[in-house]
Amino acid sequence: MAATFLKYLLIFATLSSTLAYDPDPLQDTCVADKSSVAKLNGFPCKPEANITETDFSFDGLANAGVVNNSVGSLVTGANVEKIPGLNTLGISLSRIDYAPEGLNPPHIHPRATEMIFVLEGELEVGFVTTANKLISKIVKKGEVFVFPRGLVHFQRNNGEEAASVISAFNSQLPGTQSIGATLFAASPPVPTNILTKSFQVGTKEIEKIKSRLAPNKS
């Protein structure tokens, strides 16, 4: 039995190291030194003597954000950029607030799987697999939903009241790439002839979308 247990323990250890998305920590803490000019996969550690409790706390998720943009949602991140103590720990959170009929537009997180917990309201959520299958559901207060790493997903508040969720990620900095902004508001811009052929529409339609998603637009 001991040999069998050891075999499964080794398999689990191998899978855990293979599936980890952020590097595993090699010390108790590695509080991010965001002032450093060093380039590496993550942030350098600041000296232990300079670490304080503020490196590990953040109160920005306590209250609903003010939603005043055209899509009707606001994301407040609690990642390593806000909490330096998350550096090397492989986790982060966000709060998303939605106005009535607000949308968190289709996007991906290239470095993390996401799980949302509904704080208030009711949301229509979904993601699309690489086989172009839509997995969608209505989630209500107290329920959770998972978006696999790297897949296009969205959330929409179909209700008449505001809604909010807490999102958890298995990365200290999951990254967000909005499909619309990526294609139509890149700098320098994606060539219009590529977009017209990809979406099978004319130049006028592409230019209209680009103008609406320009960086100075809300």
Image: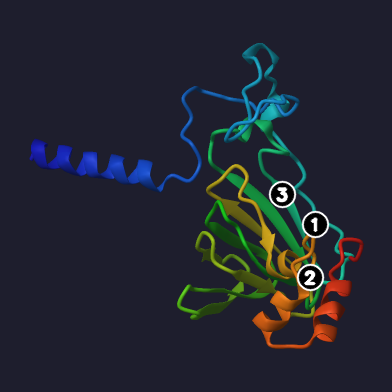
Q: Secondary structure at mark 3?
A: strand
Question: In 3D space, how far apart are the residues under numbered discs 3 and 1 (Cα atoms)?
Answer: 12 Å
Residue type at mark 1 is Ala
Q: Say which amino acid is labelled 2.
A: Ala
**Percent of width and height locating residue 149:** 51, 59
Q: Who's the residue at 62% across and 56% down the image?
A: 167
| Residue farthest toward the bottom in the current orientation of the protein | 201
Q: CA distance from mark 3 to mark 2?
A: 19 Å
**Residue 107 vs residue 83, the one in the foreground:** 107
Residue drawn at point x = 70 percent, y = 71 percent: 121
- Residue tagged 2: 162
**Can residue 158 be seen at all in this image of the molecule?**
no
Name the quadrant containing residue 118: bottom right
Residue at 87% across, 61% down: 215
Which residue corresponds to mark 3? Answer: 77
What is the basis of the colouring in this image? Answer: rainbow
Residue 141 in which image quadrant: bottom right
Front residue of 208/7: it is 208
Q: Secondary structure at mark 1?
A: loop
Q: Residues within 10 Å of mark 2 (few under 14, many from 20)?
A: many
